[in-house]
Each structure stands twice: as structure tokens, then as C-alpha cells.
Amino acid sequence: CVFYGTSTGNTESVAERIATALGVTAEDIGSVEASTLSSYDTLVVGAPTWHTGADAERSGTDWDEILYNDVPNMDLKGKKVAFFGCGDSMSYGDYFCDAMGELYDKFAESGVETIGFFDVDKTPECVASKAIRDGKFVGLACDEDNFYDETDKRIAAWTEQLKSEGAA
């Protein structure tokens, strides 16, 4: 299942396209019980970045509370988790998809197996991001404001990668 938080609808749109490519459903994290996450073997989770420059709660969505109050108390060990994020790489290049990095950090602390790292050179330009580890984004970074015409191609490549890494 693809779980997402959204403010403007961009992340929801990307989530629905990812879900279609994987043959699963997409759910707004604010419309489900957080405990639902533990019932899946593979999760794809995504969020926009709104609170640029913040140390925590960067998405401005229901994920902010769930990441700090619920995820640390869930048994997620061994589950595969992939991440995606939406941001504005042109106006907020210093913070592009930072919330995706926060999702990654909090889920990784829970002992999940992270999948879906994506080459930085296959994503929109950015100056810096808290979602980059060892030269790669921790997941699919999308810019629906400036590079929306590239998103479907990136989703296709990324979801094929997820399938090769054992995602349902």
C-alpha cells in the first residue's frame, strides 16, 4: 500500500500514480489508523516538504504526528519501506524533499529494510536536501511545480526498481 500526506494534492497525485504502477492502493495517512502500517510487509510512504528549514515535522501533514508518536512504538522490523517526496527544487533548493529524509530517518530507526534509493542525477536540480544519503536520494524525489513533465517517467523507472528489490 502507498501511504501519503498531502497539502496541495501534488503528493496525492504522485501517490496514486505510484500505486497504479505497483498494482496497490493509495491511502491518505490522515484517513487511516496509524496501526494499519504494521499490517503490510511492504510500504511505500511519501510526503511533501512544507516546513522548510525545520529540524522536525517538516511535512506539514498528518505524518508529522505519526512519525514521532506512533512509528517509534510499532513493530516494523523486517518490513520493506520505500520513500517518495514532493517539493519545489527551484524555489526551495536548499530544502528539496527534506520531509522524505525525515520519513526515512524515523522508519529506519524502527528497524525496517529500506528500499528504493534513487540517483540524484535522475532528479530535479537542488542545492541540498536532508533526503540525500551517500550521493543518492532515499527515495523518489518529485517536483510537481517545475518538472511535472518528468514525473511519470521517474515513477515508471522507480517502481520497476522497487519490484526488483522485492516490493509487491
Image (tube, grey):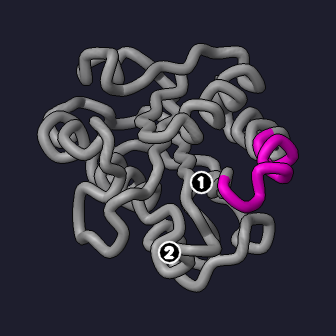
Q: Quadrant of residue 102?
A: bottom left
**For the residue marked with disc 2, what is the amino acid?**
Ser
Q: Nearer the viewer, residue 156 or 151?
A: 151
Main SS category, magenta section: helix
- Observer-side mark, 2 or 1, equals 2
Q: Where is residue 159 shown, x and y percent of the image?
A: 75, 37
Which of the two discs, 2 and 1, labels the residue nearer the N terminus?
Answer: 2
Residue 25 visible in the picture: yes
106 with respect to 151 (left or right): left
Q: CA distance from mark 2 to mark 1?
A: 12 Å
What residue appears at the point 63 percent right and 49 percent down from the top-left corner?
116
Q: Are marks 2 and 1 in contact (CB under 8 Å)?
A: no
- Asked if the stretch drawn in magenta spans residue 23, the answer is no
Q: Which mark is residue 139?
A: 1
Q: What residue did someone put label 2 on? A: 129
* Magenta range: 145-155
| In the image: residue 87, left or right of residue 74 | right
Q: Position of 152 compared to 103: left or right?
A: right
Q: What residue appears at the point 63 percent right and 78 percent down from the top-left corner?
A: 126
